[in-house]
Image (cartoon, grey):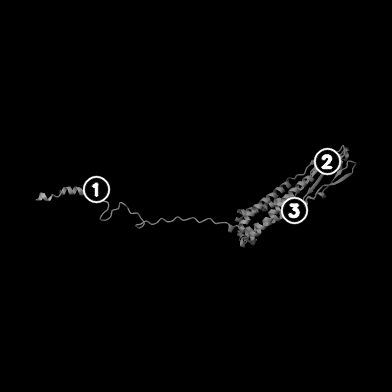
Amino acid sequence: MDVVNQLVAQGQFRVLKVPLGFIKALQWFFAIFAFSTCGSYSGMFKMEVECKNRTDSDLSIEVEFEYPFRLHQVYFDAPTCKGIDTERFFLVGDYSSSAEFFVTIGVFAFLYATAALSVYVFFFDKYKENNKGPLIDLGVTSVFAFLWLVSSAAWAKGLSDVKTATDPDEVITMISACELEGNACREVHEPVMSGLNTSVAFGFINLVLWVGNLWFVFKETGIIAPFMRPPPPPQEKPAPEAQQGGGYEQDPYAGTQGGGYQPEYQDAEYGQGYAQQGAPTSFSNQM
């Protein structure tokens, strides 16, 4: 327990919030639904054969089938409408290959997603060391993306054939007593295929998840880094040049010693004093 607690304490669970870890968690989740909805399926349909002689009729013929859908091994007994004799019939088709392939891919995808999540959470630093982890992850993810495409398409086709082979209206045509005049054969209950339809949908959802995750795993490899140009550094504005005279503007109204601008009131005072003293007389008047 101490080792487990230590691993949990050291785990980098924040990786589950980024696309790399979050999509891997979705892959783990949807892989479970994909193989479980297909691998755990069992279905049944019911028919009735009503003979001209009512005592020879069988109004409840149940036919059960299940994964892996080796329908050629599924049989049922139907009356011949000729006394108490019955006739054995087998369904048609063996669709185990596509169903088992789909379930196998789902199981292995679940196991790999579990292992990858463990590495992301507890050993993410070693995962990115020398890019070996991302490169392996990229290769395995590519393989699973392709396998999900093949298995989902194959199982979708196989499911279509299973529906046809288990259609009560199609099976009735195999019963020879239904061809005799005076006998009536009809469907009582058809198989429920919603679970199998869901498995196909989960298969293609897994395909989208694994293909979409390729980009985020590819980014972790660093292969694209040399081809990405960093943005140019921001250009600094040149400092303003220092102005002459110590770098500051001289006040145009500041006076200087021995000259400069003189206010008008000083000129007025000077003129008034000059007039009071009197203007100098000419040399001729003094004589």
| Tag 2–tag 1 contact (CB < 8 Å) | no
Q: Earlier in the sequence, mark 2 or mark 3?
A: 2
| Tag 3–tag 1 contact (CB < 8 Å) | no
Nearer the observer, disc 2 or disc 1? 1
Q: Amino acid at mark 2?
A: Glu
Cα distance in 3D space between marks 3 and 1: 112 Å
Q: Position of residue 25 (x, y in %)?
A: 65, 53
> Would residue 26 be seen by someone viewing this image from the given angle?
no
Cα distance in 3D space between marks 2 and 3: 35 Å
In the displayed orientation, state which residue is furthest to the right: 83
* Disc assigned to residue 48: 2
Instruction: Kindly identify the residue that appears in the image at 58 percent across and 59 percent down.
Output: 226
Q: Which residue is mark 1?
A: 265
Q: Amino acid at mark 3?
A: Phe
Q: Position of residue 260 (x, y in %)?
A: 27, 53
Q: Quadrant of residue 142?
A: bottom right
Q: Is residue 84 left or right of residue 39?
A: right
Is residue 45 or residue 178 the one in the foreground? 178
Nearer the observer, disc 2 or disc 3? 3
Instruction: Kindly identify the residue that appears in the image at 76 percent across and 46 percent down.
Output: 160
Cα distance in 3D space between marks 2 and 1: 131 Å
Q: Position of residue 44 (x, y in %)?
A: 79, 45
Q: How many numbered badges does the structure rendering display?
A: 3
